C-alpha cells in the first residue's frame, strides 16, 4: 500500500475485509509511516450515513479559505478538486458499507447516498496528487469496474491472521495449545473475535 501511495500515485484505494479484521488499524499504522509525504491527512467515518453534501462541506473546512462553501454539490466537488490538486492529501472514508442497502444486491447504495458513487468515479478519473481510501466490508461496484482499466484505482482484501493469531491466545495465557488452531479457524482468523473469545475463555 505504501508503494501505491508514494510510487504509483494511486487516487482511489479500497481496503476490504470483514468487521474486526484490522482495516482501520492497518490504515492508522500506515499513516504513521507516510504522513510526512502529505500536506493533509483527513479521516472521516461514514457510520452515521452523512449525505455527500455534508461530507464535502466537512472536508472543505480543512483547507484554507474554503470555510464558506455553497450548498451546490457540483461547486463543492469543484472546490475539493482544486484542493486535491493544490495540496497532497490522504483522505480516509471508514465504514463505507453503511451507505449500502441492507438485504439487497451487494454494494447497492441507499437512495440518499447514490451521489457517492459518482463522486468516487470523479476522484479516480480527474488529475490530482491526492488519494482517497475507502474502508469497507463490501467492495463498491464502481471500484470493481474502475480498477480493470484505471491504473490509479486499487483494492486490497485483508484475509485472516491464520496461525499468527496464536500470539493473541498466548497473550491471554490460555492452555490446551493443541486446540488453538481449531479456535482460530472457527473465528476465521479475525483478531477482534479471537481477542474477545480469548478474554471470555480466560
Image (cartoon, rainbow, N blue to C red):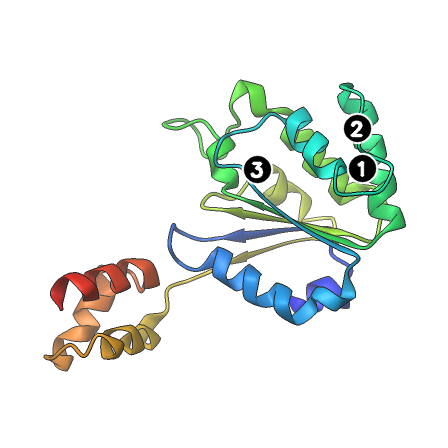
Which tag is nearer the camera, tag 1 or tag 3?
Answer: 1
Q: Between residue 174 and residue 17, name the one nearer to us.
A: 174
Element type where label 3 sits in the image: helix
Residue 153 position within the rendered picture, expressed as x and y whole percent measured from the top left: 69, 51
Disc 2 marks which residue? Answer: 76
Q: Between residue 12 and residue 27, name the one nearer to us.
A: 27
Cβ–Cβ under 8 Å for marks 2 and 1: yes
Identify the residue shown where x is 49% and y is 42%: 95
Residue 77 position within the rendered picture, expressed as x and y whole percent measured from the top left: 79, 31
Q: Give me the disc on residue 141.
A: 3
Q: Earlier in the sequence, mark 2 or mark 3?
A: 2
Q: Give me the disc on residue 80.
A: 1
How far is mark 2 from mark 1, CA to CA? 6 Å
Element type where label 1 sits in the image: helix
Which tag is nearer the camera, tag 2 or tag 3?
Answer: 2
Q: Mark 1: few, some, or many residues within 10 Å (few <14, many ≥20)? A: some
Amino acid at each position: 500500500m505504501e508503494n501505491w501511495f508514494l510510487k504509483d500515485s494511486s487516487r482511489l484505494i479500497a481496503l476490504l475485509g470483514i468487521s474486526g479484521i484490522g482495516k482501520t488499524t492497518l490504515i492508522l499504522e500506515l499513516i504513521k509511516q507516510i504522513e510526512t509525504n502529505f500536506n493533509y491527512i483527513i479521516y472521516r467515518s461514514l457510520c452515521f450515513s452523512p449525505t455527500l453534501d455534508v461530507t464535502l462541506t466537512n472536508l472543505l473546512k480543512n483547507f484554507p479559505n474554503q470555510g464558506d462553501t455553497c450548498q451546490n454539490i457540483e461547486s463543492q466537488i469543484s472546490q475539493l478538486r482544486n484542493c486535491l490538486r493544490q495540496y497532497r492529501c490522504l483522505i480516509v472514508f471508514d465504514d463505507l458499507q453503511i451507505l449500502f442497502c441492507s438485504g439487497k444486491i451487494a454494494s447497492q447504495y441507499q437512495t440518499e447516498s447514490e451521489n457517492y458513487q459518482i463522486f468516487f468515479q470523479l476522484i479516480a478519473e480527474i488529475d490530482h496528487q491526492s488519494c482517497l481510501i475507502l474502508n469497507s466490508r463490501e467492495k463498491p461496484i464502481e471500484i470493481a469496474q474502475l480498477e480493470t482499466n484505471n491504473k490509479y484505482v486499487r483494492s486490497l482484501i485483508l484475509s485472516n491472521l491464520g496461525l499468527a493469531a496464536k500470539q493473541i491466545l498466548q497473550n491471554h495465557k490460555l492452555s490446551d495449545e493443541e486446540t488453538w488452531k481449531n479456535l482460530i479457524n472457527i473465528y476465521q482468523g479475525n483478531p477482534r473475535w479471537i481477542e474477545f473469545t480469548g478474554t471470555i475463555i480466560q
